[in-house]
Amino acid sequence: MRPPSPPGAAPRLGVYVHYPYCAQRCPYCDFNVVQPGPEGRPDARYRDAVLAELAVRAADYPGRPPAVSLYFGGGTPALWPASDIAAVIEAVDARLGLVRGAEITVEANPGEIDAAGLRALRAAGVNRLSLGTQSFDAALLARLGRRNTPDDNRRCVDAARAAGFDNLSLDLIQAVAGQSLAAALADVAAVVALGPEHVSTYELTIHPRTPFGARADRGEVLTADEDTQVLVYEATRRALRAAGIEPYEISNAARPGREAVHNMLYWTMDEYLALGAGAHGFRHCPDDGGGVRWENERHAGRYMAAALAGRPGVRAEERLDATALLDERALTGLRLDAGLPVDAALEAAFGANAARLEARGLLVRSPGEGRWRLTEAGRLVLNQVVAELCG
């Protein structure tokens, strides 16, 4: 695994492109998703809007080294014609530069892309797929409102390999009410059998203003109890590790050298340019040691109109001073199994609190390596640890 960047290192840059269109909205999803109307998806217009936004936003990142990653998320960006994705890749390379071998990821849903579509993505320059498999239990997939089947999952992986993809990430949703430990581990075994380079495992989270949120408000229990969640989480990490897929972050595991380059930018407080409706971006402000985080206009129609007019809209912007960035570094860095790189500023701000957490068995300080790491017990209560560390 590439370790977290040492304190003071120049930030790396990635690019995130949000494609908001989906064939359907899953009942647990709170992402910025649009279901096309009768007129269909405005793919070419959306492509032109993203390219217009890139022309404006690139100026906010002067003098940066070439981008190490380009991530197409959504929504379901695999529904976007590969020719449009290729146009965005080419424009990012022309405007910002892409390092040789840059990680270029597209999210896709099994059952919604065929072998020809996968070959077209590979030919466009995409070299990594993130597949929304979610489960290999047909009944659980139905409960989650998914349209893919276990066979769709397997066929999609086979087709992706045949198309030339050698870097696949598969997702699992766990901790669903009624899902036993044995059933959760059967899903893990099914994923491992497909030989992915990367696995992401997420506990089902209930968000307001979603169908699942409305059902929870009516008293329906949709998630497993806390004890079961802990058992599933710990057993999943052990099973993945035994299969050579090493956990490296709270929710992610990978074969050696296949950790997600783009997601690491989030956890190491590097920079990422946001393009597309509802996309989130972050950049450092060297002059004052702070940073800026923003969210684009979420409404796809308004986003396209503004971007094509040369004035990409910002829905929300947050300016972070140097103190706020320390809190952010602690929150994101402690998610990593490799730990949080500690410099003089972090030690001065949080060193006493870190010592107290270490005494309680929640944190390990490694002065020789200059890092703080969560213990297994601390990993289960990450939010509590961060609150006490930064309190």
Image (cartoon, helix red, strand yellow):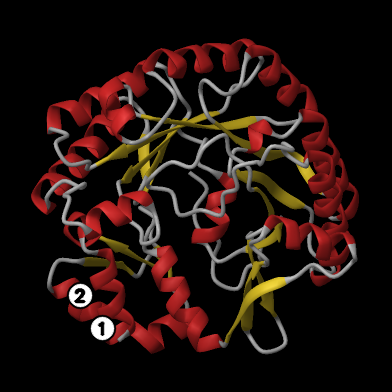
Q: Nearer the viewer, residue 37 or 57?
A: 37
CB within 8 Å, label 1 to label 2:
yes
Residue found 88% across the figure and 57% down from its top? 52
Q: How many marks?
A: 2
Q: Looking at the picture, how far across and down is residue 60, in whole percent? A: 80, 71
Q: Is residue 310 above or below residue 16?
A: below
Q: Is residue 324 above or below residue 12?
A: below
Tell me the residue that label 2 is attached to.
357
Can you say which quadrant of the picture contains the C terminus? bottom left
The local crowd at label 2, few if under 14, some if 14 to 19, many if 20 or more residues have their Cα within 10 Å, is: many
Q: Is residue 67 above or below residue 183?
A: below
Cα gap from disc 1 to disc 2, whole angstroms: 6 Å
Q: Is residue 13 visible?
A: no
The local crowd at label 1, few if under 14, some if 14 to 19, many if 20 or more residues have their Cα within 10 Å, is: some
Q: Is residue 295 left or right of residue 143?
A: right
Q: Secondary structure at mark 2?
A: helix
Q: Looking at the picture, how far across and down is residue 266, in whole percent? A: 54, 59
Q: What type is the residue that disc 2 sits on?
A: Leu
Tell me the residue that label 1 is attached to.
353
Q: Looking at the picture, how far across and down is residue 124, in whole percent? A: 79, 28
Q: Nearer the viewer, residue 109 or 379?
A: 109
Q: Looking at the picture, how far across and down is residue 313, in whole percent? A: 75, 70
Q: What type is the residue that disc 1 sits on?
A: Asn
Q: Is residue 310 left or right of residue 359?
A: right
Q: Nearer the viewer, residue 98 or 21?
A: 21
Q: What is the quadrant of residue 385 in the picture?
A: bottom left
Q: Is residue 368 left or right of residue 377?
A: right
Q: Secondary structure at mark 1?
A: helix
Residue found 69% across the figure and 37% down from its top? 38
